[in-house]
């Protein structure tokens, strides 16, 4: 049956065995019900070696490229989307460290990210900063021996669970030269802050509608002391690092594809159990939905291959197409399941709430549209 096709593609590393996926699936519903960080899922991620996929081999990782990272995120999303966004953020921070870290940062941090000792999170968003992160209120003050950071981050995935946070801070004037960026502003700098820094306080009291096991919450910085050794990349250049992110080919579209596939699998299951595959109308509806999911998967894979004329724009297209497709497919599956999906406990409702989050995650779909259309002027 084609429904499971997306879940059977072998991962090169073969880390996501059926047993591992079953464990991740087993805790997803409870985490969604309770709205608490899915610690069982993070324990699975830490112990299977999957956190090391994006780390180069010389630092103990698998050195996987974006096609495999996207595929891995998709497979996890199909069983536990909250775990998938934690994994996605971990890979994103890992890649930023690989690309921009100093030799000392590589030597110290990458082996820990590879072994699963450390889970990484990304704290850029703030209430009022805007989807494009231009109006940051989190600031860095120069001191004799480093920096003191103050501010409040919101919607940080893996808050309180992560061991290291990539934090976006305003350290200089946003009006400085180079301020005409579409995402981020001049004078912004990245810092890597460990969870044992007494100035960093996570708070997971944020009650989310979807991705409820992802520990997406607040991270406050109060008199948070860091040094220039904790800085990732040159001072004031975070916006240029952000601009290069989409060139990596890693895409949240992979999360959306996993969710859409899970809904499709549920639809096939239901249709088989109820004898609905006898009905041509139902069969054709399922074919159309499968076609949509396959198409979304194809553009996610194309983003990962980075072989289009403009890989960054393909990555933006992949997120836009896969996330809108997932929302549409899941809504159609809910209609197909009829009363079976109209009960609170139906997983299809969770897939729908989780899929909506993908469109809201950075860059938001509207900002993706803006970034794609900006390229037309250049
Ligand atoms: C489940 C979940 C997990 C998340 N995890 C993280 C995380 O780990 N780390 C992190 O830093 N953030 C995370 N985010 C935050 C996410 O990046 C923000 O939701 C996003 O930045 C939007 O912020 P906002 O709603 O405050 O934007 P607002 O600026 O208030 O946006 C309001 C609306 O206007 C649109 N808009 C705003 N500015 C523009 C623009 N310049 N061009 C076009 N449209 C625009 C937006 O798309 C949106 O539709 C997460 C969000 C969710 C839902």
Image (spheres, rainbow, N blue to C red):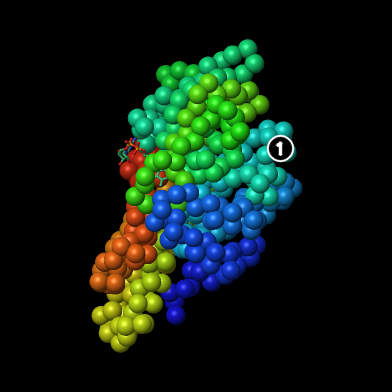
In the picture provided, is 332 more to the left or to the right than 98? left
**Can residue 7 be spotted in the picture?**
yes
Q: Position of residue 91 (x, y in %)?
A: 57, 48
Residue 192 in sight:
no
Residue 157 rendering spot, x and y as whole percentages: 47, 44
Left or right of 340 on screen, residue 211: right
Residue lying at 64% horizontally and 58% vertically, measured from the top left: 48
Instruction: Name the residue beneath numbered marker 1.
Output: 108
Q: Is residue 154 above or below residue 297?
A: above
Above or below: residue 146 compared with residue 239:
above
Q: Quadrant of residue 67?
A: bottom right
Dot 1: within a 10 Å radius of its alpha carbon, few (fewer than 14), some, or many (20 or more) residues?
few
Q: Secondary structure at mark 1?
A: helix
* Residue at the image position 53 percent from the left and 52 percent from the top: 39
Ligand 1, by image quadrant, is: top left
Q: In the image, is residue 225 above or below residue 82? A: above
Identify which residue, 105 or 287, lies in the foreground.
Answer: 105
Q: Position of residue 98 (x, y in %)?
A: 64, 41
Residue furthest to the top = 144
User: Which image quadrant: the N terminus?
Assistant: bottom left
Depth order, front residue of 218/322: 218
Residue 378 screen position, x and y as percent = 40, 36
Q: Residue at x 58, y 32 (%)?
A: 193
> In percent of the image, x 67 and y 39: which residue is there?
109
Q: Is mark 1 within 8 Å of ligand 1?
A: no
Q: Is residue 273 left or right of residue 10?
A: left
Q: Is residue 311 above or below residue 344?
A: above
Residue sitting farthest toward the front: 34
């Amino acid at each position: 049956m084609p429904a499971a096709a997306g879940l059977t593609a072998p991962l090169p590393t073969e880390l996501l065995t059926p047993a591992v996926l079953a464990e991740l699936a087993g805790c997803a519903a409870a985490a969604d019900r309770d709205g608490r960080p899915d610690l069982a899922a993070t324990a699975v991620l830490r112990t299977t070696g999957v956190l090391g996929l994006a780390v180069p081999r010389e630092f103990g990782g698998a050195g996987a490229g974006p096609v495999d990272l996207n595929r891995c995120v998709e497979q996890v999303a199909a069983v536990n989307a909250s775990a998938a966004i934690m994994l996605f953020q971990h890979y994103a921070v890992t890649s930023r460290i690989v690309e921009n870290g100093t030799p000392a940062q590589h030597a110290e941090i990458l082996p820990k990210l590879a072994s699963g000792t450390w889970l990484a999170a990304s704290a850029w968003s703030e209430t009022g900063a805007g989807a494009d992160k231009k109006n940051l209120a989190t600031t860095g003050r120069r001191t004799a021996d480093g920096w003191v950071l103050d501010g409040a981050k919101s919607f940080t995935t893996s808050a309180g669970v992560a061991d290291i946070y990539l934090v976006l801070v305003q350290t200089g004037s946003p009006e400085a030269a180079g301020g005409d960026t579409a995402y981020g502003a001049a004078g912004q700098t990245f810092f890597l802050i460990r969870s044992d820094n007494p100035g960093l306080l996570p708070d997971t009291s944020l009650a989310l509608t979807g991705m409820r096991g992802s520990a997406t919450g607040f991270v406050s910085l109060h008199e948070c002391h860091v040094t220039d050794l904790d800085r990732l990349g040159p001072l004031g250049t975070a916006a240029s690092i952000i601009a290069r992110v989409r060139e990596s080919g890693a895409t949240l579209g992979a999360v959306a594809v996993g969710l859409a596939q899970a809904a499709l699998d549920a639809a096939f299951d239901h249709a088989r159990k109820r004898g609905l595959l006898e009905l041509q109308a139902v069969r054709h509806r399922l074919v159309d939905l499968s076609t949509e999911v396959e198409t979304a998967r194809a553009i996610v894979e194309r983003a990962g291959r980075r072989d289009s004329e403009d890989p960054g724009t393909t990555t933006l297209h992949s997120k836009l197409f896969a996330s809108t497709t997932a929302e549409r497919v899941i809504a159609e599956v809910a209609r197909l399941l009829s009363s079976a999906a109209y009960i609170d406990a139906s997983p299809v409702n969770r897939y729908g709430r989780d899929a909506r989050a993908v469109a809201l995650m950075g860059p938001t779909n509207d900002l993706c549209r803006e970034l794609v259309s900006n390229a037309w002027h250049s």
